[in-house]
Amino acid sequence: MKYCPACGQPVEMRVPAGDNRPRAVCVACAAIHYENPRIVVGCVPEWQGRILLCQRAILPRRGFWTTPAGFFELGETLQDAAARESLEEAQVRVAIGSLLAVTHVLHAAQVHMTFRARMLDEHFGVGAETLQVGLYEEREIPWDRIAFPSIDFALRCYFEDRRAARESLHFNTVERPLDRSET
Ligand SMILES: [Zn+2]
């Protein structure tokens, strides 16, 4: 942040009184602009043992594969967001299940939260941000073409738990990007 969203004047980084870390403080109106991590929500939709994957039509990681996920919006629950992203990206209706994985993506200041999900019917389609969508067996997953470490982590946990007939919650931390194309 370079300019104050409230008044348009420059901000400077300094530690406000009573705080313990630098914040963007407006030189004109003294507003303090706190920046916090953003939440990305998604799910792993399953239909009769197969997993729904989307090939990304947009940057970052265009052409790579992901499960439906996107930024959490105001006024919705995490489950609402996961279901909405599934509809937007893959035209798929899901029942959201248990929380599968939480990945702290430190370099991007994001928290990625992924749920298990069951597709309500076999219908799916291509959304605006997607090149193609399909249902895949575990052995068909393109592991070397998965878009993000958080999705790779969630998928590996998903199959591991499914084999063990359990639904655990898994945590992971990613400190740096895979490569330049991710950011
Ligand atoms: Zn200002």
Image (cartoon, rainbow, N blue to C red):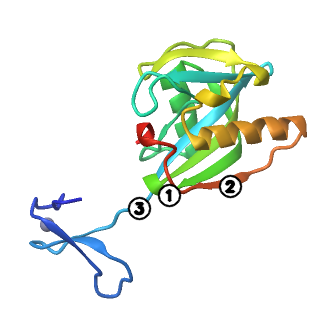
Tell me the quarter of the picture where residue 4 sits: bottom left
Q: Is the distance from the Cβ of mark 2 to the nearest ligand 1 atom less than 8 Å?
A: no
The answer to whether residue 120 is left or right of residue 125 is: right
Dot 1 or dot 2: first in sequence order is 1
Quadrant in which residue 116 is drawn:
top right
Residue that numbered label 3 is attached to: 36
State which quarter of the image contains the C terminus: top left
Q: Nearer the viewer, mark 3 or mark 2?
A: 2
In the depicted structure, whether residue 171 falls above or below residue 64 = below
Q: Residue furthest right?
A: 164
Q: How far apart, in angstroms, are the residues tagged by discs 1 and 2?
A: 13 Å
Residues packed near mark 1 inside 10 Å, few (<14), some (14 to 19) or many (20 plus)? some
Ligand 1 in which quarter: bottom left
Of marks 1 and 3, which one's residue comes earlier in the chain?
A: 3
Residue, x 50% and y 53% (percent of image)?
A: 176
Image coords of residue 100 (percent x, y): 71, 45
What residue sits right under mark 2 in the picture? 171
Q: Considering depth in this image, is 32 or 79 the residue closer to the camera?
A: 32
The residue wearing badge 1 is: 106
36, 159: nearer the viewer: 159
